[in-house]
Amino acid sequence: MVDDLKKINELIKNRNFIKSLESINQIPNHEKNFDIISLKAYVYLNLKEFKKSYECYSIAININNDSFICFNLRATASFELGNFMDSIKDFKKSLLINNKFYEPYENIGKCYSNLGNNKKAIKYYELALEHSPNNNMLIEMIAEKLTELDTPLNTGSKISKINLAIRNLEYEYTLNSIINDGIIKKIIYEAEYLINKDFKNLNFSQTQIFRKNNLNLNCDRHFLIFRNFKIIPEYCFSCIKVTINLNNVIELIKLFLIFDNISLPNDNLRKCMIDLRKNSKANYKGFIYCRSVEEAEIVKKTINQVLKVKISEKLSANIKRGCSEFNDLYPGYEDPVNNRVNYNSEWKKHEKIIDKKFTKFKSIKKTQKTKRGISFNDIMIIKNWLFFAKLTNDDSFKKIAENINNNSNLKKIIEQNKLNIKN
């Protein structure tokens, strides 16, 4: 038995999960041995066989109900199956055994987020942060979740206090006049002052600012299908974007302010972003998501009128379909008018495979509508935009910001993709 365990562990260490499973199944009555059945559960988890993993962890827990790892990983299997309440129960049981790690608290927060309970999600993210106080990713998760509350929340934490203070910053926005650079400079200066009182050299990883409605695009599901089978999911054929390419970082920030204030027919989801891909035609972009070409035409007309008044008469939007990764593999997909690429009904069987294995996608009920107004999260992402501008020959940032924090992770991405770095 000792030799068997050693062999199985070595196979797992080398991520040879199929052979390790074969070795386990050759051991008589292996389901009665805690060490082996828990290894089998772990193998199934890595093979994305979440139901089988859950069943094996349940057997292991019946043998030994004092295992932090088994409760924690059975909770992970439940999460992937979309059984978020079961997942919460097991994460809480793992904490009764050992509460020294931040990950179970974070994962409970993710469960509550997927259930649409943002306040409880924030509560558990903050508990995770208490156990890992220098964890920037947790700070970022809390800041993002605070943007998705119906009413402002003050939990007493530094993050929620800063978020409320930034939300209370006032700036001038009128319908019929250009957005002045000085307005942006004032917003950034006042927000940075509030942030720097409690957080020095804080960096976020995100480079996209969303203004969300409660429509779940389910992009994680769609890209999982695309990566596994090299097909475009059916849903994505009706994902039409009104796209705006900007010339510099100031224009991008102005578009963000427009997106924060604009009224659209269906409160369409919209985002502003910097494009970090090597072959991108534009560094600064904005998108408004629509469900039909007809809706996109209406939105395009509306946004073009606003762009010419608020930013520049030279700017105009265009309409395209879905994600550029899809168009790279299926040229012509992004053209929603001529329909050179259509959904292949044979692809449906591949979609069903993913939906059967990853049942969580059907169970997610996030409440994610973004509250209007500038947030802590927005400012931290804008700081990433400014750092990007500093590194890529866009000197417009000098008009609105002086001290730009270094973001080593963002710099690494820019270098890896060989974007136009300024020496």
Image (cartoon, helix red, strand yellow):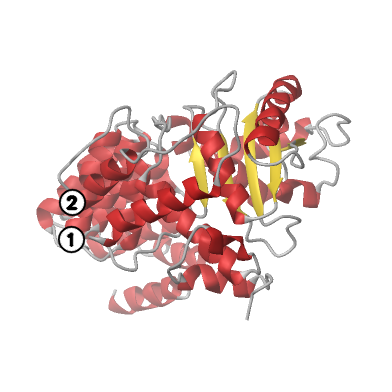
User: Residue 127, percent across and down?
Assistant: 18, 51
In this view, the residue in front, 373 or 170, is 170
Residue at which label 1 appears: 131
Q: Residue furthest toward the left?
A: 96
Vertically, is 405 above or below 237?
Answer: below
In this view, the residue in front, 17 or 343, is 343
Residue 236 visible, this orientation = no
In this view, the residue in front, 271 or 101, is 271
Quadrant containing the C terminus is bottom right
Residue at which label 2 appears: 127
Residue 333 visible, this orientation = yes
Say whether residue 402 is left or right of residue 230. Answer: left
Say whether residue 194 is left or right of residue 218. Answer: left
Quadrant containing the N terminus is bottom left
Which residue: 42% across, 38% down? 171
User: Residue 330, percent across and down?
Assistant: 82, 46
User: Residue 38, percent across and down?
Assistant: 29, 59
